């Protein structure tokens, strides 16, 4: 990408003034979103139906707005878009995000025709994002697509052909402790397309990992080059939507994409070193790992567990995901035998050792030491710490359960930070919360633990499955990078 | 199973009087659990260390208890169990649940020896459940393994070699709207083993579906017979723990099981018609489907969605799970076109139609009608209704979002009940809640919808993935039953 193009993009993500065309005091998510961030004082509303919106003057036309506008958001009926776009060109607007649907994705002749017209009007005069998309969320500048997203910036870039996936990232980012550099929903890709954004985020110093949702592409060669360009610089984790013939049928109705066969995409992703995932949860979970963790040296984990049955199932799961749960060295076993009671436990890997969640007050040989030992074994590359224990603690400690848990959190963190920062291995935590749980005390202490771990920059997963699948992607990427380096050397 | 044996089992699940040996006022989950149910007045505590527990007299020995005791729970150190068991025999106790760990599962000579001794003492004189297990939860009688479980009885039977899996079912049953006939954690299976319980639940009129977690068996032929016996009578959904060599290594440490190769188990389950699942979530989700739904006539679903991107991913997911998402008939499409706005929607299957969540006040052509149409298409065997929409409604309706959602729930239920009760097809709901969500208003209305659907006996899943995987198991079982019936005819 050349310098000029980067400058064009920088301006798109950091506009001076923004206008919403078709702004409305009701059901206008775009305006609500912009009014919720620091960009609010540089937002202008356009709609001949209103004289005022959110206590601000509303202009009948973009041509009446008294300041220069870099970036407009179209929220008007599709059939009016081309004409109003011409006014934007007259105004000197550089980029238009066409929120509106009703173009080629309808599959109807009038929609296809309308999109053709849109392109003709825009060509060489204004750049387009969309149509049929949520546009851009850039916490640094204040561009936003929903009113609830965080204003903190972060290191995750998202490029998605689906608006709901952009919305979902924006909404659940806070919940997952994910923070974003840029989130881009690009819809039908009438002008700017996936490869443009890939190249830009590949060179964007703020973006550490790129999450991608793509249904199809009009230029396979271009996409391949952009994917390679990006994956040579940072991890790209992607969902190909429409991997089955039938999903692909739905994708065509969704964004009018030429979707290609599943084989073509699988091989494209593999050739380019894209980490492929199957659904939104897997995408989010993998991106959390890439956002927070250093790459592991290998695929061998140790697991702190609190159940024999679950240890068995989890070990099976790890192997299914290409993660090893090796035996500990004799030295590690010997150390653990000194610290972990025998009855009801399994001194091995996973360490199924519920009594250790109660051994937290002892000066020597407490849970912090045990976690340190689990992470120090020479056969181990990563550590997984699991907590699904508050209700057990409550049964045992009753009114002291809360205080016990607070101490437990500090003790666990001590061990986890030792493994990450001193031993130097990636550490994840799984704090199990059932989504439908209504035991508010249980939920409260689990969330307290989650926040405490997040404050020290550990990624926290709601199930062990989610965590294991995430680090398996991390390992897969690390292994490929290592083998690439070897091939180069 | 003969009549005498059934009577023996009925008595185990419905004892007249119960004693806890090694009862304690602190950290004694067994006593806490029993004191939380209607059996509390028939529970007796035994421990020479205390004269009173929970305000009740505590006896120094089982021999001092002034009433006959059918069922005892052992919570004392493993090495004292054989001698105290002899006292129980003297007292005339029929069954002992050995909660205690520290037997053959330790892999140590003294543990193996102790279990041998236990068997010798018991043989022909008293029946054993365990050792190393949580025992029995039977809401009808009041036997319980944790203090938080529901006292309502239901149609799900659980047999598990892992205590934590029994605990997890008991704890999260309420959350999942699952109610149980009997939950059995049988641990090392020194006496009663999985086949005994399988046969009993197979003929238990209160049990509609059996959930099974098994790590291994000492008598493969016996297990096979019992599995066949059970699957000929009702669905059995099972996890084999230790499916990989490594998981199997952990299983051996867990319950001293002979675990067999994954191939042997896979083929055993297949031959016997067991529905195999891979983890606890899949087990719970499948059991919810079997507990609430009639069997579908085929594998074709229609999906009410609110996102194009997710519709694409979900369609891919369905095909990966052996579920079809067929095109609707022209008639259905024509009916839908009249009711669903065109822009931003996909009129097809899945129906991606977010505007319909707002079309609920219209007398004709509201969401109830649309759901009815989705379920009535002749190409469709099951209906999946999805809701992940409250935050969108809040953005659009703001202070009226709550009221809107209450109406929406009633409208959706009207359509869902029509499809289930009039058209006669299974219907599931997916009400999406992120486990870490802390937007309490969003959570509140999603939970409100969940409870409303549950009150009308629809199974509700927290993600579409979970729901689809569950009905794929339902279909798999239905298809096998149909083909069995054909083979017989």
Image (cartoon, coloured by chain):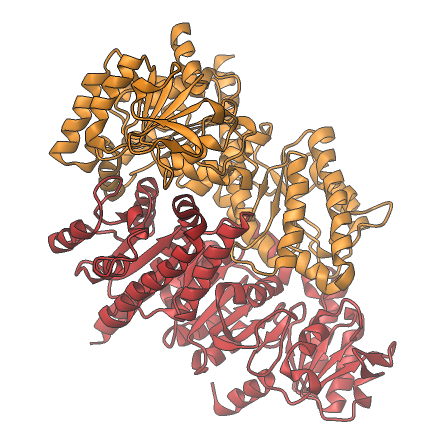
Chain colours: A orange, B red
Farthest front residue in view: A51
**What x and y, as percent, mark residue B85?**
75, 81
How many numbered circles does the render carry?
0
Nearest the eye: A134 or B380: A134
**What x and y, as percent, mark residue B369?**
23, 60
**What x and y, as percent, mark residue A274?**
41, 27
Q: Quadrant of residue B460?
A: bottom left
**What x and y, as percent, mark residue A488?**
48, 13
The reply, left or right, for residue A152 in relation to residue B419 is: right
Locate the C terminus of chain B by quadrant: bottom left
Q: Quadrant of residue A120?
A: top left
Say if residue B106 shows up in the picture: no
Farthest bottom residue in view: B67
Nearest the eye: A41 or B307: A41
In the rendered view, would you say A119 is above or below B93? above
In percent of the image, x 58 and y 55: which residue is there? A310
In the rendered view, would you say A245 is above or below A197? below
In the rendered view, would you say B350 is above or below B451? above
In percent of the image, x 17 and y 27: which residue is there? A114
């Amino acid at each position: 990408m050349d310098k000029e193009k980067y400058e064009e993009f920088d301006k798109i993500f950091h506009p001076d003034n923004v206008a919403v065309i078709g702004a409305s005091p009701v059901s206008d998510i775009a305006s609500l979103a912009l009014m919720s961030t620091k960009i609010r004082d540089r937002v202008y509303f356009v709609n001949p139906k209103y004289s005022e919106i959110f206590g601000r003057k509303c202009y009948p036309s973009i041509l009446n707005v008294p300041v220069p506008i870099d970036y407009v958001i179209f929220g008007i009926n599709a059939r009016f878009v081309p004409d109003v776009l011409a006014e934007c060109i007259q105004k000197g607007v550089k980029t238009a995000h066409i929120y509106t649907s009703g173009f080629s994705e309808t599959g109807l002749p009038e929609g296809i025709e309308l999109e053709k017209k849109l392109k003709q009007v825009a060509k060489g005069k204004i750049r387009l994002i969309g149509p049929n998309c949520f546009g851009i969320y850039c916490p640094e500048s204040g561009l936003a697509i929903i009113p609830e997203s965080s204003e903190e910036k972060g290191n995750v870039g998202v490029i998605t052909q689906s608006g709901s996936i952009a919305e979902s990232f924006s909404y659940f980012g806070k919940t997952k402790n994910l923070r974003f550099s840029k989130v881009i929903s690009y819809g039908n890709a009438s002008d700017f397309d996936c490869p443009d954004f890939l190249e830009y985020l590949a060179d964007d110093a703020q973006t550490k990992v790129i999450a991608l949702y793509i249904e199809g592409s009009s230029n396979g060669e271009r996409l391949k080059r952009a994917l390679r360009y990006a994956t040579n610089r940072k991890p790209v984790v992607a969902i190909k939507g429409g991997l089955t013939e039938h999903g692909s049928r739905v994708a065509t109705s969704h964004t009018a994409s030429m979707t290609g066969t599943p084989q073509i995409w699988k091989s494209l992703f593999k050739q380019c070193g894209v980490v492929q995932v199957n659904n939104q949860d897997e995408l989010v979970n993998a991106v959390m790992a890439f956002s927070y963790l250093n790459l592991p040296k290998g695929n061998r984990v140790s697991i702190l567990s609190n159940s024999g049955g679950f240890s068995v199932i989890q070990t099976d799961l790890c192997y299914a995901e290409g993660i090893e749960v090796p035996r500990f060295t004799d030295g590690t076993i010997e150390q653990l035998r000194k610290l972990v009671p025998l009855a009801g436990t399994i001194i091995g890997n996973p360490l199924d050792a519920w009594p250790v969640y109660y051994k937290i007050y002892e000066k020597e040989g407490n849970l912090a030491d045990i976690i340190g030992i689990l992470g120090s074994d020479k056969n181990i590359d990563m550590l997984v710490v699991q907590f699904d224990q508050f209700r057990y603690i409550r049964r045992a400690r009753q009114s002291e359960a809360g205080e016990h848990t607070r101490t437990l959190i500090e003790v666990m963190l001590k061990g986890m930070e030792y493994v990450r920062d001193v031993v130097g291995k990636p550490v994840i935590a799984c704090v199990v919360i059932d989504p439908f749980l209504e035991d508010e005390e249980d939920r409260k202490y689990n969330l307290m633990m989650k926040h405490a771990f997040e404050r020290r920059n550990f990624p926290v997963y709601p199930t062990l499955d989610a965590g294991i699948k995430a680090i398996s992607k991390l390992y897969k990427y690390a292994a490929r990078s290592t083998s690439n380096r070897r091939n180069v050397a």
